[in-house]
Image (tube, rainbow, N blue to C red):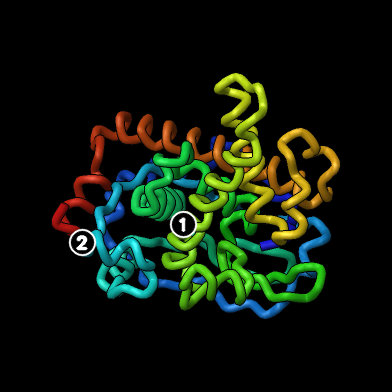
Amino acid sequence: MKERVAPQHTTSVHYVVMLAGLVAVGLTGSMGSTPAPVSDTLAQRTSAVAVAQAAPAARPALVALAADPAAAAVSPFRMNMSGYYDQLRSKLHWLPVRLGDSMLKTPDPQSRLLLVEAAAKNAGLDQVGLSYRDVYGIINAETSWIPRMGASKDGTPNLGIAQFEPATARAVGLTDPTDPVQAVHALALHLKDAAIWSAKRIANLKLTPEERALKLREGVSIYYNLSTKGRSVWNGLNTAKLPIETRRHIANARIGAQEAAELEEQLQSVRARVGVPGMMTASFQKNSGG
């Protein structure tokens, strides 16, 4: 969860064409595939790598947890969540992507937004001024949506699509950091804590609502990217003095959030063109009993 490689973003034209094909077939099937295993540490993610196909996301349906609200206050990863997670996994589709010399897999556009919207809703991110776009953005900053193994500068492994260190995963109750569905939900919960921390750090600053929203998100990246000691120096005004990796994380999270918004708009446009608005949403809600 420390530093990451700056992603290379391809043009949105390719995504519009791909989205059109995905919506046209309705995305009602499941590929049932999982990310390819990878053992390299990506040279501790300190050098840029070429991503052959960084497929962003399309609009999914939100999923309500069929769980006891009282139990939800404990930890969703310690509850019986297998049915919920299995339902989400059945809707995921994966695309091949080249990372350096390795061929890995990345969730397709529909799957990305399906995951982040469901995770953001169930974490209650709207309560702290965040949304699914912020979940998408942090994953963009961490791995460019390519599940893999990385490492912090001290050699600590960073696992999966959200790059959880083992200790952090245990702290949030995440049992399998390499499972994208679990990891994205854990990330959303972690972001809620990050937003609360960030809001306290900037509480006394005189900011416009727009400036406060930007600073809040700066703090979220700082919380996610740095250790407790490293983040404690941030006061909302000294971001430029933070490590370059953290500043890059802030920028890439911002790019990812914008990408999520653009992809959502693209999918809505594609659905309108092919005459099947809400096809994925309707299909998912029917299968989920929503």
- Of residues 66 and 203, the one nearer the viewer is 203
Where does residue 278 sit, x and y in percent of width and height?
Answer: 25, 39
Where does residue 46 sit, x and y in percent of width and height?
Answer: 82, 61
The residue to which callout 2 is attached is 66
Residue at 48%, 77% in the rendered image? 176
- Of residues 206 and 188, the one nearer the viewer is 206
The reply to whether residue 88 is visible in this rendering is: yes
Is disc 1 surrounded by few (<14), some (14 to 19) or many (20+) residues within 10 Å? many
Quadrant in the rendering for residue 19: top left
Give the Cα distance between marks 1 and 2: 18 Å
Q: Amino acid at mark 2?
A: Ala
Residue at 83%, 59% in the rendered image? 47
Which quadrant of the rendered structure holds the N terminus?
A: bottom right
Numbered badge on residue 128: none
Q: Is residue 72 above or below residue 236?
A: below
Q: Residue lying furthest top in this view?
A: 208
Where does residue 113 sit, x and y in percent of width and height?
Answer: 42, 48
The residue to which callout 1 is attached is 189
Q: Is residue 268 above or below residue 286?
A: above
Q: Amino acid at mark 1?
A: Leu
- Of residues 273 and 282, the one nearer the viewer is 282
Residue at 52%, 53% in the rendered image? 193
Mark 1: secondary structure: helix
Where does residue 200 sit, x and y in percent of width and height?
Answer: 59, 41
Is disc 2 surrounded by few (<14), some (14 to 19) or many (20+) residues within 10 Å? few
Residue at 49%, 65% in the rendered image? 183
